[in-house]
Image: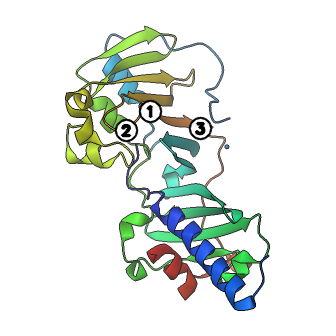
Amino acid sequence: MTQRIGSAASIRRVAALATAVLATTVLSAGCGTGDASSEGTGAAPSPSADPKAALLAAVPDEKDPAFRFSTVEGGEKFDGLVDPATQGLELSMSEKSQDPEFTMGMTFRVIEEDIWVRVKITGMPGLQDMMKLPKRWMLLDRTKLDDASEVPVYQNADPANTAAVIRTAETVEDRGNGTYGGFADLTANADIRASFSTVDVDALGDAAKKVPFTAVVGPDGNLASLTLDVPAAGKQKAMKLVAKYYDFGKAPKISAPTGAEVQKAPASAYEMLNG
């Protein structure tokens, strides 16, 4: 349930590459070796005469201050920051390898057209050096990426594409206390279909046209969460897709890395991202 902010494919490739690098090193050596549910305090919003319009008005836009967000879609989880004033986006994800055991984290930072990435490997000392991956921010050249869709871009202040989902509902019910409900049509258009990386919309059949959702607007008037209850279909289990927006005005502003904290991305970074 996202705009084009990338997918977990990149981080999976990173983890796979790290495992391969480790295996090669071991063979050649001959020996082995984010609660995001904060929704503010105060009085709940009053019931609206037009619930759908009221809910859409709560979705973040370019006038909002910096805020944090998180999304959960099946086994994919992202955390990040949005700073509309700078057209800035920061997106973090991680993947854990069980054999060998280590965790790889990757954070992208985007400001307008510029993009940086930072990699952090924990649980296995020396692996990051083996992969020749700096621990600093690395400035990327998008023209050197095989598939630019694998890295984030800033599109607008609604990274989870919540407004597009809400607009597909014929009607929205105001359930009181800032809670709204309705049914989303995941087949409405190509952009909606592209918002879901782990949901087989075709397998859902007619059920995809009426997926129940619940939205919560915080006392500050901002959308706090949107949850889609996707039913089971074929081999696909039922799942909840959750987007949360929080810390409006409390999150740090996004700025370009400077000085010793940044360098141009080396060839190893493009090898990582291009798989």
Query: Looking at the image, which residue is at 39% across and 46% down?
Result: 198
Q: Are marks 2 and 1 in contact (CB under 8 Å)?
A: yes
Asked whether residue 133 appears in the rendered view, the answer is no
Residue type at the position of mark 2: Gln
Quadrant of the drawing holding the N terminus: top left
The residues tagged by marks 2 and 1 sit, at their Cα atoms, a distance apart of 9 Å
The residues tagged by marks 3 and 2 sit, at their Cα atoms, a distance apart of 35 Å
Question: Residue 101: x percent and y percent?
Answer: 71, 62
In this rendering, is residue 84 above or below 222? below
Where on the picture, by quarter, is residue 11?
bottom right
Read off the residue under disc 3. Answer: 248
Query: Looking at the image, which residue is at 25% across and 27% down?
Result: 207
- Residue lying at the far bottom in this picture: please name it: 28
Taking 30 as reference, is 143 left or right? Answer: left
Residue type at the position of mark 1: Met
In what element is the residue under mark 3? loop
Read off the residue under disc 2. Answer: 236
Taking 168 as reference, is 70 left or right? Answer: right
Question: Residue 70: x percent and y percent?
Answer: 55, 42
Where on the picture, by quarter, is residue 263?
bottom right
Q: Nearer the viewer, mark 3 or mark 2?
A: 2
Closest to the observer: 21 or 1?
A: 21
In this rendering, is residue 15 above or below 34? below
Query: Looking at the image, which residue is at 41% across and 29% down?
Result: 228
The residues tagged by marks 3 and 1 sit, at their Cα atoms, a distance apart of 28 Å
